[in-house]
Amino acid sequence: MIEISNLEFQYGDADFRLRIPQLSVAVGEKVAIVGPSGSGKTTLLMLIAGVQVAERGAIRVGDRSVAKMDDAERRSFRISNIGFVFQEFELLDYLTVRENILLPFLINDDLKIDANVQAAADQLAESMGIAGKLSRHPKRLSQGERQRAAICRALITRPRVLLADEPTGSLDPVATDQIVQLLLVRASEIHATVLLVTHDHRLLGQFDRTIDLVECQAAGAPAEAS
């Protein structure tokens, strides 16, 4: 599903540089990404999603080469094929929870809201325990409820790839366990490939594989840990 080779990326003149000789993630695989702050975990997700563009190397998601797309193509591909759960939720305060969940359909002309999509939003909200909050605005939700809404938004398009950047960083351990379990269960239902960045090593047993990004870059091959 995801194939990366000879990847190099740098932010302007900054000292940081991400180098990944080779990394592969299979269809439907659930992978945790670990590493210290500044090792490039968030950058890697942004490159896979096409938010950032690598200086060198190749990133393929399915049968598409991210590097060969222009800005408009990357944006359309990302909205239709990739669900992204951000650490800070990135919900829009002026929209209701329902509208936030349906946001990919509101900003992409290729996606149309119909009765099936509305029903899917209701079902996702129900499964995440926020069905009674759909008419509220994000400021009236708890941290955990905002994260659940953000996960619903990431899943509403039934993406092929689900990327999550420290999605439970602001939650307590009990809420963290609940959120990650819900995210993985919902992703399995739609056969999505999952890459989740985390500093919480308690969670690693829930994933098929763990990639240490520092070891991955240093060894010249994808590093695995159980």
Image (tube, rainbow, N blue to C red):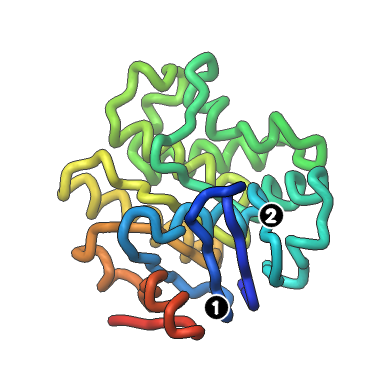
Residue 204 visible within the image:
yes
Location of residue 151 (image quadrant)? top left
Within 10 Å of disc 1 (Cα), the crowding (few <14, some 14-19, many 20+) is some
Rendered view: 167 above or below 47? above
Q: Residue at x 30, y 69 (%)?
A: 206
**Disc 1: which residue:** 23
x and y percent of residue 67 in the render? Answer: 76, 61
Which mark is drawn over residue 209?
none
| Above-or-below relation of 22 to 45 | below
Q: Nearer the viewer, mark 2 or mark 1?
A: 2
The residue sitting at 72% across, 35% down in the picture is 114
Label 2 neighbour load within 10 Å: few <14, some 14-19, many 20+: many
In this orientation, does residue 3 appear?
no
Residue in the foreground of this view, choosing between 190 and 26: 26
Residue plotted at (36% across, 74% down): 210
Q: Quadrant of residue 129?
A: top left
From the viewer's perspective, tell me whether residue 205 is left or right of residue 184.
Answer: left
Circle 1: residue type:
Leu
Give the residue drawn at x 38%, y 77%. Answer: 215
Q: Quadrant of the N terminus?
A: bottom right
Residue farthest toward the top in the current orientation of the protein:
94
Please state the horizontal and vertical placement of residue 140, each as a whole percent of the image.
34, 17
Q: Amino acid at mark 2?
A: Val
Please tell me which residue lies in front, 134 or 61. 61
Depicted 31 relative to depicted 68: above or below: below
Percent position (x, y) of residue 53? Answer: 69, 54
Q: Is residue 104 above or below residue 166?
A: above
Return the x and y of residue 162 as percentages of the image width and height: 53, 57
Q: Secondary structure at mark 1?
A: strand
Circle 2 residue: 53
Separation (CA) of disc 2 from disc 1: 17 Å
